Amino acid sequence: AQSVTQLGSHVSVSEGALVLLRCNYSSSVPPYLFWYVQYPNQGLQLLLKYTSAATLVKGINGFEAEFKKSETSFHLTKPSAHMSDAAEYFCAVRGQAGTALIFGKGTTLSVSS
Amino acid sequence: DAGVIQSPRHEVTEMGQEVTLRCKLISGHNSLFWYRQTMMRGLELLIYFNNNVPIDDSGMPEDRFSAKMPNASFSTLKIQPSEPRDSAVYFCASSLVGGGLSLDTQYFGPGTRLTVL
């Protein structure tokens, strides 16, 4: 069985500050991990994915995430927040190829000027 | 290249009516997923297909829900009869399984916002 827990349903940062969105996973098989972003009234857009090739994964818009097996974590970070980063972020886990994603509850990121 | 296309984008209907949601996969993709998003339950899988074959429909709430893939590039999700608790945003996503470097990343459509009165 697989599951994802996102710690913090809402995170607020100032523009230019570090963004840290937390995700912990549980998986009985080697996991594939994903971060998606959802802007208001839009679908989900892939930010980045972990596929075991490298533990530090770089994605779009300056985001990156580090896979830590010992901590079962896959936290999303960005060194400097921008107003346009305000959105909802979802962490997801998947097992073997072709199977469905299991999503966390999501974290809403607010960025203030 | 066009992404996943969903129609309608918004649907308002009355309880008891039949609702049909439509999804067109990205050209060349062979897997199709239907997800539902609500405030209470978040994003959850309803059903998914590989090569037009339903693989897992354990997320389909009840017999009122049915999904089909009449061809390799198109899917429908039907609710009959609809109920107010079906109100949600319904997303479909497509991927290419066995596509090598793509590693079957799921690409999402814009969603259909369904309101059942």
Image (cartoon, helix red, strand yellow):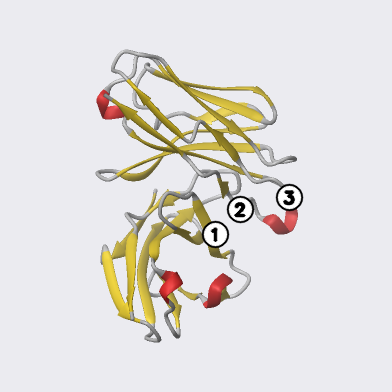
Label 1 resides on the chain identified as A
Q: Which amino acid does label 3 sit on?
A: Gly
- Same chain under badges 1 and 2? The reply is no
Vertical comparison of A58 with B77: above or below:
below
The three-letter amino acid code for the residue at tag 2 is: Thr
SS label for mark 2:
loop
Front position among marks 1 and 2: 1
Residue B56 visible in image: yes
Q: Name the residue under label 3.
A: B99
Q: Which of marks 1 and 3 is in front?
A: 1
Question: Compared with residue A6, is residue B89 higher up or lower down, i.e. above or below?
Answer: above
- Quadrant holding the C terminus of chain B: top left
Query: Does dot 3 land on a helix, a strand or a loop?
Result: loop
Q: Are marks 1 and 2 in contact (CB under 8 Å)?
A: yes
Q: Where is residue B31 in the image (x, y as percent from the top left)?
A: 63, 38
Q: Residue at x 39, y 63 (%)?
A: A87
Q: Residue at x 43, y 54 (%)?
A: A28
The residue indicated by pointer 1 is A46
Q: Does residue A55 appear anywhere in the picture?
A: no
Q: Mark 2 lies on which chain?
A: B
For the residues tagged 1 and 3, is the chain the same?
no
Q: Mark 2 points at which residue?
A: B105
Give how far across and how far down residue B66 sits, in percent. 46, 20
| Residue A101 located left or right of residue B27 | left
Residue at the front extreme?
A: A113
Inter-mark Cα distance, 3 to 2? 10 Å
Give me the chain letter of mark 3.
Answer: B
Q: Is residue B87 above or below residue B1?
A: above
Please indicate whether residue A35 sits to the left or right of residue B87 in the image: right
Q: Which kind of residue does numbered mark 1 sit on? A: Leu
User: Residue A1: x, y in percent?
Assistant: 39, 48
Q: Nearer the viewer, residue A57 or A59?
A: A59
